[in-house]
Amino acid sequence: MPNDVLIEHLKGQLTRLTESAGDLVFTLTENGEILHASQRAIGIIAPGAVLCGSMLIERVDTPDRAGLVSVMAQVIASGLHDRVNVRVHTSTGLHWFELELSAHPDLDGRTEVLVVGRNISGQQETKERLLHLATHDALTGLPNRALLSDRLRMAISHARRTGRGFTVLALDLDGFKKVNDALGYAAGDALLREAAGRLQKALRDNDTLARIGGDEFMVVLPGASHADEINPIARRMISAIQLPFEIEGQSLYLSTSVGAAIYPEHGDNEVRLLAHADTAMARAKETGRARCVIYSRATFSAPDHDVSMEAALFEAVRNGEFFLHYQPIVNAVTREIVGFEALMRWMHPELGLISPSQFIQMAESNGLINLLGAWVLKAACVQLKRLQEVAGRELYVSVNVSPRQFRNDQFLGLMEDALKLSGLHGRQLLLEITEGILMSDPAHAEALLLQIAARDVRIAIDDFGTGYSSLAYLKRFPISTLKIDRAFIKDLPQSVKDAAICNVVLSLAQHLNLTTVAEGVENEEQLQFLSHQGCSLIQGYHTGRPMMFDDAMDVLGAGAAELALP
């Protein structure tokens, strides 16, 4: 074959190889000027145009140019090949390409750079979609907890550099549970999407709104660190939620409660800020709802919100530092022990016995109360089984249920598990709830209490008379027991007002066929007065202090039908 024919043949093969090497193939000078472009590259970027003599970087999207220049310099200096992902302007728009660069000398010894690119727009879109799913809430499209954490770290870093603080808001939708119960989860999801859109419109462009679960949202307000900056934003959000929601042909009305924590005044890290914002939101709910409360060290109990104590609380759960005390509940006439109230206690290895007032509310706000409450239920039921075996007769155990436990969808299952594990009858378990639990969401409370009562488990209203004291719920809900708060007991029988209140409560309970338990009975005069007025059961230091399980076993094992009085 003649040389010129051979040369043309080789050129043809080289051209075919070049065209098939990738979507884009270029030969560049050291400075990035295009010496050669494949026909396929010309067709993709600018059909019919002459690319030779122009700069490749001009075809690359501006934010990606620095990356291309850097990789090209490294390839020329090292003689090794490397890759870079860039967006390239094409005849059909901006597309992602993976460019592989390699440097080699030409016939004259000058350095040329071979660039072979392939379109990776499909893979990049998939990657971005997966990244979005990992960092955003699927229902509302808002940032999720992971992205919120990232934004908070950025806000803290910026605040430290500039010396200007920012604010974290916590909010949820008051009454949202009723929508799910009445209309179903599809309606609830539609409402959440609408609420998210309204909240987003009430914020500034640089604010971050995140959904962290259920109807709970968090907001980061960069640069806002004073009440006069925070309150207008909070008011816009509250007003946006108070407008009626049109869901499935029905007008629904909700409100939102907002809590605020300011960096660095209320916390210098993510954990403190979120915890204090959540605490402030709880205070907003307690004091009327549809309002914003800014956290204050002066008015919020420090021990309840000590983050170091919270960390110790998590450690205590892992290390098994909790145990139960049992306070006897006795028949007001016979003084016989008929049951015990199970009281959770925490023994810290260094601080000793921690008061429940220091950790119960903290566990309620950070969610640990669900785990601790489930343990108390099971432990109390199992240990009561052993106590009544020693006593030789049936007893019952009374267990406190917190608001967060009561709202937990798994609560009913946990209660059933405790009864099944211990072998107790439902009537041997008394659940103590507060009046506030009933009134915060009556529809949910009624539905759950009816399911509980259907299993023969009894319900007691704790601290009766100190909360809402709505007589309507005594008729509406399946309540079996009223616990008269110690505030009405401590001055008996001398206090005429307290005596009158106790008489009314006891008379009401008798007419409604409810059992009554008087708490905080500390002397014989109080016991005699309550017994004569028809109080069913007595609980207090006079008839028995809270005791360890082994001590309760000893008392019952000694055959003490009545507790020895001091």
Image (cartoon, rainbow, N blue to C red):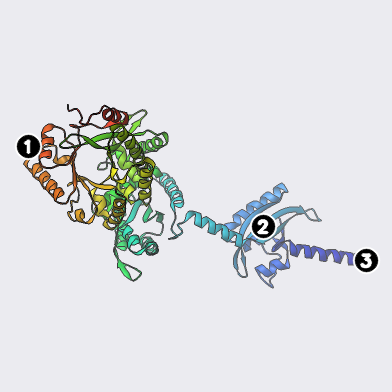
The quadrant of the rendering that contains the N terminus is bottom right
Assess disc 1: are there few (<14), some (14-19) or many (≥20) residues with their C-alpha within 10 Å of its C-alpha. Answer: few
Front-lying residue, 36 or 100: 100
Name the residue rendered at 72%, 53% in the picture: 102
Name the residue rendered at 40%, 64% in the picture: 186
Residue 360, compared with residue 232, is above or below; it is above
Between the C-alphas of marks 1 and 2, the distance is 91 Å
Amino acid bearing label 1: Gln
Amino acid bearing label 3: Pro
Front-lying residue, 258 or 191: 191
In the displayed structure, does residue 53 sit left or right of residue 475? Answer: right
Whole-percent x, y for residue 350 in the image: 36, 28
Which residue, as the protein is rendered here, is positioned at the far right?
1
Q: Secondary structure at mark 2?
A: strand
Which residue, as the protein is rendered here, is positioned at the far bottom?
48
Q: What residue is disc 3 on?
A: 2
Q: In terms of sequence position, does the residue under pointer 3 or pointer 2 come before the other?
A: 3
Q: In terms of sequence position, does the residue under pointer 1 or pointer 2 come before the other?
A: 2
Which residue, as the protein is rendered here, is positioned at the far front?
392
Assess disc 3: are there few (<14), some (14-19) or many (≥20) residues with their C-alpha within 10 Å of its C-alpha. Answer: few
Label placed on residue 99: 2
Label placed on residue 494: 1
